[in-house]
Image (cartoon, rainbow, N blue to C red):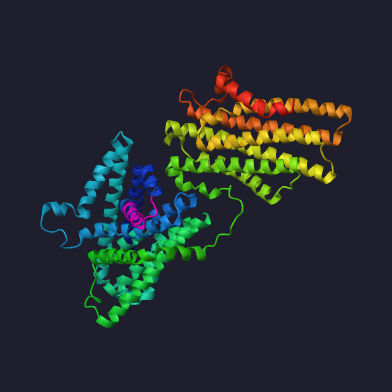
Amino acid sequence: MDLLLILKPLGGLGLFIYGMLTMGAALEKLAGEKLEKTLETVTSNIFKAVGMGALVTGIIQSSAATTVMVVGFVNAGLINLRQAVGIIMGANIGTTVTAQLLRLDSSGTVEGSLLLQLLKPSVMAYALVAVGAWLFMFAKKRKSRDIGEILLGLGVLFIGMSIMETAMAPLQELPWFQQMFTLFTNPVLGVLVGLVVTALIQSSSASVGILQAVSATGAISYSAAIPIIMGQNIGTCVTALLSALGANKNAKRAAMIHFYFNLIGSIFFIAVVYSLQAIIHFDFWDAPIGKAGIANFHAAFNIIVTLLFLPFHNLLIKMAEKTIKIEPTDNAVIEDLSRLDPRFYSSPAVALDQCDKIIVSMGKCGLQNLQMVNAAIVEGTPPHVETFKDNESFLDRAEARLNSYMLGIKEDDLSENSRKDYSEMLHSIGDFERVGDYAENLLEFYQDMHERGTVFSQEAISELRVMSQATEEIVAMTVQAYENDDAALARQVEPLEEVIDAIKEALKSRHISRLQSGICTVNTGIPFLDIIHNYEKISDHCSNVAVYVMMLADVDHTFDIHEYRKVLTELRTDEFQAFTSLYENKYLSKVI
C-alpha cells in the first residue's frame, strides 16, 4: 500500500510531463518554420512582442521552451534584446494557459449539462487519446499525423493529471501530510520548494499542475500556495539559463532578463501580498485553495507583473548588460560561431541562414587578410598581424564547425531550392577557407623577405601591384556575388580569372628575363614566382564560388559543377568577351 502511494503519483507525473513534451514537440513540428519565422520578425514594439510571447507560449504550453527559443534567436542575431524582453514577458502570461485548462475539473465549474461534463479534461482525455492515436497511426499526411500527436499528448497530459489527483486523495486523511503543508506558510521555505521542484522538472506548467493535483486533497491553504507559486516562476528560469551556457554573451543576457524579471516580480509580489495580509488580514488566507484558485492566482501574478514591468523593460536590459559585459572588438567582419545553434535543426531554413552568414564572414575575412598582405608586399605597410591571425583562426574554426554543423541538417526536410543552397554552401566553405590559406602563404613570403632584408625591384613591385589589385577585385566581387546571390555579378568573375591567368604567365616570362639579365637575384626571384602563383590560385577558388552562384540561379541545372563548367565553356557569349576585354584593358595591358 505504501509503495502504491509513491508509485501512482510518480507515474501520473511521468504521464503528465510526457504528454506536455509530446504535445509541445508536435506543435513545433506542425508550426515548424512559420512559428520561428514569426518570432524572427517581431519588431521593437514592446506590446506586439508581449502579445507574440503570450500567443506562442499559450500554443506550446511552456514558457521555458519559448524562452529557450528566444535565447537561440538572440544567440543567432535574428532578434535583439529589446525584441527579446517583450517576448519573455509575454511568455509568462502564456504559461498560465495550462493551469486554466486543468482547473476545468474543479468541482462545480462545469456541472449541469452533458456537453459541459464531456468537456471536463478527465473525461475528454480518453477521447483525445483515441482520436489522436488513430490519426498518428493511420493518417497518410504528415500534417494529420502531427495533429494526432498533439491530441495524443494533450490527452496523456490530462490522464496523468487525473492519476495524480486520484493518488493524492487518500493522503488528505494522513496527519503528517496535513502538517507538512503548514510548514510552507513560511514564505522563504515555500519559495524554495517551488523553485527546486520547477528547476528539477524544468517546467513551471508541470509544477503548477502538481500543485493543483495536491490541492484536490484540501490540505493546501492560500498562505502555503502563494509562496510556492512565486518559487515556481523563479525555478522556470533554470532551463533558459542552462540553454545559454554555451551561447554568446547577448544570449546570456536574454536568459538573465528572464531571470531578473521573474526574481524581481516574485520578490515584489510577496512583499505586497504579505504587507496587505499584515494590514487587512485576508479572510481566505488560511482557507484551502483549489485548482481554480491556483490557476487564477498564477494568472493574476504573471499578468500584473508584466503590466508593471512594461514601462521599465529597458531597465531589465540594462541590468542584464551590467551583469554580462561584452568587451569591444575592432574586427567587425568576424561572425560569432555560436550562430550555429543546434536549436535551429528543427527549422532547417533558419539553420541554413545561419550557415550562410558565417560563410559570408569567411569570404570577408579572406578579403581583409589579402588586402593587408598586399599592402605589405606592394606598399611596404606592415600588416596588423594580430588581426590577420584572428581572421585565419576564424577561417579554420569556421570551416570545421560548418562542416560538422551542416551534417546535422536533414536534407529531406529542405525544399528543392534549399537543397541547392545547401550544396552551394558546402562547396563554398572550402573555397573561401583556401583563399585565407593562400593569403597566409603570401604573409609568410613577405615576412621571410623582410627578415632577410631582401626587396623587389621597382619594376617587379609595379607588376605585383597590378596583379594584387586584380586579385583583390576578384575576391571582393566573389564575396559580394555570394552574399547577394547576384548571378549577374558572378558572371564577371570568370573573365577576370582568365585575365589573372594571363597576367601570371606574362609576369613569369618577364621575371625570368630579369633573372637572366641579372636585374633580379634568385633570393627575390623565387618569392616573386611563389607570390604570383598564390594570386592565381586565389582567383581559381573565386571562380569556383562564382560558378556555384550561377548554378544556384540556373533552374535548369542540378548541382554538378563539372557538367556546369562544360556548359559555360561552350557558351562563350558576347557578354563574356566584353568583360574579358574590359579586364584586359584594366590590368593585362599594364604588364605586357
547, 44: nearer the viewer: 44
The C terminus lies in quadrant:
top right
Corner quadrant of residue 535: top right
Residue 444, image quadrant: top right
At 28% from the left edge and 50% from the top edge, which residue is drawn? 154
Where does the image place residue 107, in percent across and percent down from the top left? 17, 63
Residue 2 is left or right of residue 108, and the answer is right
Residue extending furthest toward the left: 112
Residue 494 percent location from the top left of the image: 60, 26
The spot of residue 483 in percent (x, y) is: 53, 38
SS assignment for the magenta stretch, majority: helix
Q: Is residue 137 left or right of residue 319?
A: left
Which segment is the magenta one? 42-56
| Quadrant the N terminus occupies | bottom left
Query: Looking at this rendering, what residue extends furthest in the bottom direction?
Result: 279
Residue farthest right in this picture? 518
Question: Residue 47 colored magenta?
Answer: yes
Q: Where is residue 429 drawn, in percent x and y?
A: 58, 37
For the residue pair 176 and 328, the one nearer the viewer reads as 328
Q: Is residue 221 visible?
A: no
- Left or right side of 173 for 525: right
| Above-or-below relation of 221 to 581 | below
Residue 431 appears in view: yes
Is 83 above or below relative to 583? below
